[in-house]
Image (tube, rainbow, N blue to C red):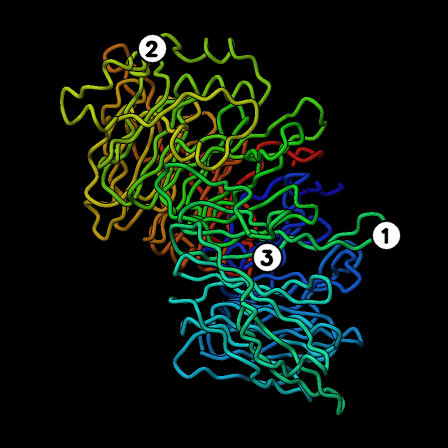
Amino acid sequence: MAAATIETCHVACCANRTPNVVSWSRRGTIAFGTCNSVALYDPQERKVVALLSGHTNRVNAVQWVHREDYGPERHLVSAGSDHRLIVWEAQNETFIQSVECKGHTGPVCAVDAIYMDNSQILVVSSASDSTVRLWLCTEGKEAECLHTLSFGSGFMMDVSLARLPGSRVPILACGGDDSRVHLYVQSHGQLHKAMCLQGHEDWVRGVEWASIGGELLLASCSQDCLIRVWRLCAKSGTDARPEDDHTVIKMKEDVFEVKEKDVSSVFALSLETVLAGHENWVYGVHWQPPFYRGDELQQPLSLLSASMDKTMILWAPEEGSGVWVEQVRVGEVGGNTLGFYGCQMSVDGSMIVAHAFNGALHLWCKDQDRKGEWRPGVVISGHFNAVQDLSWDPEGEFILSVGADQTTRLFTPWRKHDSQQATWHEISRPQIHGYDMQCLATVGRFQFVSGADEKVLRVFQAPRNFVENFANISGTSKEQLLTSSDSANLPEGASTPALGLSNKAVFQGDLVQKTCEDEKQFNSVSDQYQESYFHPLNMTEPPPEDHLLQNTLWPEVQKLYGHGFEMFCLASDSARTVVASACKASKAEHASILLWSTSTWRQLQTLPYHTLTVTQMAFSPDAQHLLAVSRDRTWSLWRRHPTTPDNPEPQFSLYAHTEKDTSIHSRIIWSCDWSPDGKYFVTSSRDKKVIVWGSLEDAADPGLPPEIKPRSSILDVGDSATAVAFCPVLCSDNR
């Protein structure tokens, strides 16, 4: 039998919460750190093309190594909280780990690299051990640490490498928490201090070099909300020592000397401009990369900056005067987020991307029809903390997931009219909570129950605006979807009150705009501050982050009280009539399973058996049995009684269970699932065992429940087995 082939069709992820974690290559691939991996994302195809796993802790900095001939990059450097740097090399469309740099004693926060003459890579890194290290990486050899700069108790936030104009000598810029930019020049393998640039009044957050017409420009940004651009140029022998000419007003120049192979060169550095426009800390600056137009190399004078004021600004000098001015400002409005951590620009300057405090990527594309206008683009998104639970919609058309980032997200394939391939996107964020989310169960087509680190379960139902937009994006019939849900009473959307945790429904009548006359006079204080921030959207493509934050919430229709501690797991049956829930428990009295009716949302029954937290539950495919596994290392199986006219509500009783001595598992049982025919179930545990259970054929006494034993050899998976699932279809030979 040929094994089924499985391929990745979507990775939902977001950028880590650090400034230097996104880098855009000349080939068009965006590399960003996500948890302990580096994701390679193609913004044209709108999907993650590769995940590079090698770090054992969070990835903090990612940088493509740009080639001197401006061809497509072949190397990528990443640095992480595991104190290591990894150089990745492209080989046959995949990236492999080429060189590893070990030596830092703290998390590495910034990295940059350039090629040396003989295909070696010069890498510079800054870490929270207050050092900046210079490495020489040669393929197939260990990285050599050439020099270590120590800054005592200070930190360097960003580093940037370039070559001095007209020479091969590398120059390093470091921006630190002493509000200065330090310049170092390399000679004989060592770094020598050339100069210290003063002017910023707070921590320098970003520095980046650009080579323009035989000169270098250095952009530095700071928490003082300002950006400074410095110009570095070579001085010829005659004008190296200028006479003081007091009749000419010009910027003060600082001069330093560099010796290379007994030849001495003099370089002058002056302040080019100071850019003020941001209203909060500026975290990132990025020059537009050089590109070839025909055979001619062009370096546009265009600088992008990203700030905590939630905006990105594109700066460029005016054609006539040469004065640097703001060309374009883009950003997000509203929402409950902090601002941007960094920015990048595509090679042709037609797309810009920023990554935000909550991990989201924000992409803007230049509008081809309207000159000078930019519009938000469709980009990848995902949870920015652990994903705790997920559930398919009954029709298999979308996935709901909850995470420790306090959000519930909904992902579905987007079928564009002109493209054969569907790409997956987040099209709704039904719940943005104040507690970390823990569990979720879908009930029917557009309804789900979720539990967080609180004692309450919350029930949500899709609003009309979501159903209409889901039909547009997924290509389903809108009328069909609205008849399947009770469309007459559906609210338009939902919004969260300023100090509340519950999403309130917003109906058609609440959206009526006040007339101008009414707006002039406020009858009460509450009129001044509107309660609803919801605006109905008509979407034909997945929404950007700021819409997801406030226009795609689902209204909460019910709260379920009954548990004494934080929620841990949920399950719903295939008939969509019962929901089972369990909470964290260290005593038997709290470890009971509660059953709820989905029609009335009343508590139906309490099922006591376990003594510690129930970790997962699963209803059998025919909805006749409920399986529960627990931290007390046992499982329990509950059976549904036939309903009678006197008692139409479903009732369950204990059918089979294991004791501590018969459970086989010796540690916490994490997960369980049913086979599609309902004859077997599987359990997985921290003791590395996965066991398939089933009833032995016909028991001797039909009155007694059948004996349930392992029906296969015990599978040892070599590590803690935290999640397990049966495929819902059988293999080709009915196995």
Using the rendered view, name the quadrant where residue 232 is placed. Answer: bottom right
Residue 563 vertical position relative to residue 134 in the rendered view, above or below: above
Mark 2 secondary-structure assignment: helix
Mark 1 secondary-structure assignment: loop
Q: CA distance from mark 3 to mark 2?
A: 46 Å
Q: CA distance from mark 2 to mark 1?
A: 64 Å
Q: Report the mark closest to the observer, 2 or 1.
A: 1
Q: Please tell me how crowded label 3 is: few (under 14), some (14-19), or many (20+) other residues with Cα within 10 Å.
A: many
The image shows a total of numbered marks equal to: 3
The residue at which mark 3 appears reads as 38
Task: From the viewer's perspective, tell me whether residue 358 is left or right of residue 103.
Answer: left
Residue visible at 27% across and 51% down?
A: 612
Residue 655 vertical position relative to residue 262 in the rendered view, above or below: above
Q: Earlier in the sequence, mark 3 or mark 1?
A: 3
Residue 371, image x, y percentages:
63, 32
Residue 546 vertical position relative to residue 260 in the rendered view, above or below: above
Task: From the viewer's perspective, tell me whether residue 313 is left or right of residue 433.
Answer: right
Q: CA distance from mark 3 to mark 1?
A: 34 Å
Q: Seen from this angle, which residue lies furthest right?
A: 295
User: Which quadrant holds the N terminus?
Assistant: top right
Residue type at numbered disc 1: Asp
Q: Report the mark closest to the observer, 3 or 1.
A: 1
The residue at which mark 2 appears reads as 489
The residue at which mark 1 appears reads as 295
Residue 224, image x, y percentages:
39, 61
